[in-house]
Amino acid sequence: MKSLTLSRDALLALALIALVGLVYLRFPAFASPNSLLGVFNDTSILIILALGQMAVILTRCIDLSMASNLALVGMCTAMLNSALPSIPIPILVFLAMFLGALLGSINGILVWKLDIPPIVVTLGTLTIFRGLIFLLSEGQWVNAHEMSPAFKALPRLSIFGIPALSWFAILCIAGMYVLLTRTHYGRAFYAVGGNPNAAVYTGIDVGRTRFNAFVLSGALSGIAGYLWVSRYAVAYVDIAAGFELDVVAACVIGGISIAGGMGSIGGAVLGALFLGVIKNALPVVNISPFWQQAISGAAIIVAVIFNARSERRLGRIILKKAEQI
Amino acid sequence: MNSQYPNNASEMPDRLHGPLARMLASWEFLLIIVAVLIFFFNTQASPYFLDAWNLSDATFNFTEKAMIAFAMALVIISGEIDLSVASIVALVSTSMGFAVQLGFDTPSLILIAIAVGAACGAFNGFLVATMGLPSIVVTIGTLSLFRGIAYIVLGDKAYSGYPDSFAFFGQGYVWWVITFEMVLFMIIAAIFYVLLHRTSFGRSVKAIGNNPTAALFAGIRVPRVKFMLFVLSGIMSAIAAICLTSRLGSTRPSIAVGWELEIVTMVVLGGINILGGSGTILGVFIAAIVMGMVTFGLGLLNVPGIVMSIFTGLLLITVIALPIVIRRARQRVAN
């Protein structure tokens, strides 16, 4: 299994390099280190979200509420900052993470304690969170001049020549790597997704593990919420609307099996970068940005066909807990 | 189903309640109560609610979505899901707009719409049924792809200039306040009722949802049935697209965006088991009316659409959670 995911990541990396190479032929400057760092920076938020989504998908669940969670937390931090500019930014980032985790735990509780299918729960919270933003902000925007300079400066702060936004993504990647490969907390995600019945016999609480995954994805959405709002220096009701599908797309392209239990950090990151390169390359090679949605759709379909081949018919049924019916 | 019970079926625990008790405990009955309560609340909340023309206008809130919801119900009962329906609406609408620019007349527009819808559904069906891929991912992919094609064709522009005869589908009245869409909605509901509850095709859909392997061994051609369900879902999306385009009189690539979630909510609210295997068309029918009336009633009270979505979300979760909570409480009492 491990060699299989490894080779899949390698293939995806090759595809990514080929994609960059293709753009390079038309526009050589795109492949310069600075430009590639820019692409990474631009994709950072998607990477952070894809890591959270991956944890959830590993446990055979799905979190469609991530983008709404991001937007709600983003609006909260922006309003908090404009009302009380004296709150230090690190505390604000921590608050964002905490609030995101709290919202994620709502999903987690409903999945854990009430056994409601995750797709229904997160469809519901997707609309509820989005509606709450409107109630909270009364439809008003929080504009750049209402945010404190420090609030807007953090994502752009350069550390060793790399913007802090990218560092957030790198830290999340490193943290998730340790979590998923070196702790029992993270290994449980794989165990629960691979075979929930077997996981119970090894002493893992399946429901609690799913709850943990939702809290994790919520916390990462919360961090992404602050980053999104501070980077674009604006907060309104519709920020990141529909972004949840991009996040799922990144995971699918990255070879995270929607049937649970299979997937690597490298895959999630490469999947997100794949979408990021497409998004950044289209204007460079003079293709209308209106092509982006169709291309990422086609990429998802190709990826899912490819995934199904490599995992053979391991996980056909996605809405059903096969053993329990 | 009855054959599995012996002659003393009346002694089986699940037959202890009489037919009336079972009807009263059914999901559909609960929905009817909710519908009546909302209706009553609406009449109290706004004096404009009980106007025949207002009520007639209110049906537009749900008729188009409900047409797709019936097909979605069948797809979900079979254990799959189709998240691409709203994007099919966009692509069908764009195709019709494109055809209008080339000078096609109304009957050809209808044919083009149905053909494009069926082709989109067949594409989903091929990937899910024939290639055996998970429908949730496939249809998230085609959700992007179909609407993406609409964006490629239209960009930030819009198509309009539909022929006058085309306006009837979304704006026409059959008699007094009865709209063409309302009649079409009723006819489609009846067809789907017969299809699910009175034909062997409907039986096989339920069988597949309950246990695909057993269905296969029972001689049901599982891939073929699933393929047909996705084509059906595409065709119903096309019919909804005809009505919606005709009503709006123009096409933008963002048409019907986000509908897939509202339609899934409608279906789940209608008592269709999201895990597949059970559910009734009557339930979806009532759920459509409930959601339409909630939207309309809140609209009369000047509640913004985004706040209504909170109600929809809460309704979805509550409606699923409630029976589970009640069942657990009963078990606790029994113990």
Image (spheres, rainbow, N blue to C red):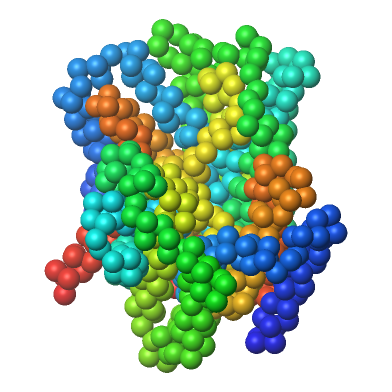
Front-most of residues A60 and A185: A185
Q: Residue at x 50, y 49 (%)?
A: A242
Q: Is residue A18 above or below residue A73?
A: below
Q: Position of residue B316 (x, y in %)?
A: 34, 49
Q: Position of residue A53 (x, y in %)?
A: 49, 67
Horizontal arrangement in the rendering, residue A176 relative to residue B239 (left or right): left
Q: Is residue B245 above or below residue A186?
A: above
Q: Residue at x 44, y 90 (%)?
A: A183
Q: Residue at x 48, y 91 (%)?
A: A182
Q: Is residue B134 above or below residue A11?
A: above
Horizontal arrangement in the rendering, residue A277 relative to residue A98 (left or right): right
Does the rendering let one see residue B300?
Answer: yes
Does the rendering let one see residue B134?
Answer: no
Q: Position of residue B197 (x, y in %)?
A: 49, 43
Front-most of residues A187 and B70: A187
Q: Position of residue B60 (x, y in %)?
A: 43, 24
Front-most of residues A17 and B38: A17
Quarter placement of the N terminus of chain A:
bottom right
Labels in figure, total:
0
Horizontal arrangement in the rendering, residue A120 relative to residue B29 (left or right): right
Horizontal arrangement in the rendering, residue A163 relative to residue B98 (left or right): left
In the image, farthest residue toward the left = B333
Q: Residue at x 49, y 86 (%)?
A: A178
Residue B10 found in image quarter: bottom left
Front-most of residues B215 and B268: B268
